Amino acid sequence: MTDRVLAEGTGVEVGAGEVRYEVLVGSGLLGNLAALLSQYAPAHRYALICDENVARVHGTTVLEALTARGVDARLYSFPAGEACKTRKNWSMLTDAMLDDRYGRDSCVVAVGGGVTGDLAGFVAATYLRGIPVVQVPTSYLAMIDASVGGKTGVDVPAGKNLVGSFHAPRVVVADTGTLTTLPSAERVQGLVEAFKHGAILAAQYFEWLTSAADRLLAADVETATEAIIRSVRIKADVVTRDEREGGLRQVLNFGHTLGHAIEAASAYGVGHGTAVGAGMLLEAELGQRLGVTEEGTRARIASGLMTLGLSLDSVPSVDVEDVLRFLASDKKARSGRPRYVLLRRLGEVEDDGGWSREIPDSLVRDVLAELA
């Protein structure tokens, strides 16, 4: 896997065989979107999907730029927020496209954050049994993590991302200039995923992120571009080796077993990054108590997250029993038992015959008591 320096930015290749695409990273890419769509995802018509917030900031501008170049495109929006990543909104968007007679020669363009990428990707995966999708992430979370790997889906009452599919994009267009339009709190939420990448596979990257946190939070374009490219390289390598999460790709779930359950138990009142950050700390604690994770690992993770202003105190009180109930329905569970990714040390995941393991509920309950 090698990067390509292109006129439109740096291209990182993801996937293998027939499922192969590029993640383009650079400033000003939105201005060249019409040409990029023609090159990577030619279609008769395009359905731009944004949440209502992004539609106001970027959606209308992108639509006008495309139509000015003769591209047949329409804009569809839905209410913003994780709580709106639902089957109801999937149905609403799908029905709107059906009413407008989009055919199989169409393409969905997901413009926005991780919620939009998941929801619009699922619309594309299921519309007429599948049409192409282009991911245009505008947040750290989407650029660093959510837009790469082909996972799509919606949340349901039983838990997060429990209905969905794998549907790889034709291309990912990450315009780092859009990060300056993000609220500072949203920058924090996305950067947690970069810290996760360092925690599981690249200790030096984790330390670099810690030292660069102020610049990243300020959306310095050069620093942000470097972080996004480094994170995409890490995730691309994992995804290329395990497209369907049958083995190695499980390492990307570090912090997410508990993190997703915390999100769901809070009715998505806790942000994704805040929940995953808490999950990383708690799962590092689990590993240390089991003698799997090197002592001091949790403290190093905590030090890194503190540069983003996050700690366990950032998480509002959640009901431990509610968290445990959501753990039982986690999509990574086997035979009704949740599985956890544990570190050996910072930058290295423990592989003891598998990349995840069961942990006794009693120990999980003890660790979760820190959130009470």
Image (cartoon, rainbow, N blue to C red):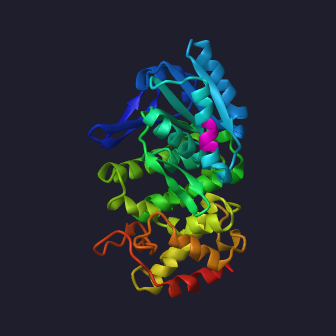
Q: Can I make out residue 303 in this image?
A: no
Q: Position of 250 compared to 30: left or right?
A: left
Residue 226 lies in magenta, yes or no?
Answer: no
| Residue sitting nearer the eye, 192 or 356 | 356
| Residue sitting nearer the eye, 61 or 301 | 61
Q: Position of 199 compared to 263: left or right?
A: left
Q: Give the x, y percent position of residue 137.
A: 56, 39
Q: Give the x, y percent position of residue 13.
A: 36, 39
Magenta residues, dominant SS class: helix
- Above or below residue 29? Residue 176 is below
Q: Residue at x 57, y 44 (%)?
A: 119
Q: Residue at x 68, y 50 (%)?
A: 81
Q: Give the x, y percent position of residue 350.
A: 35, 73
Range drawn in magenta: 89-93
Residue 91 lies in magenta, yes or no?
Answer: yes
Q: What quarter of the picture does the N terminus occupy?
A: top left
Q: Give the x, y percent position of residue 132.
A: 44, 32
Q: Residue at x 40, y 36 (%)?
A: 22
| Residue sitting nearer the eye, 115 or 343 | 115
Q: What quarter of the picture does the C terminus occupy?
A: bottom right
Q: Residue at x 43, y 72 (%)?
A: 339
Q: State the count of labels.
A: 0
Q: Can I make out residue 243 in this image?
A: yes
- Above or below residue 35? Residue 124 is below
- Above or below residue 262? Residue 91 is above
| Residue sitting nearer the eye, 298 or 218 | 298
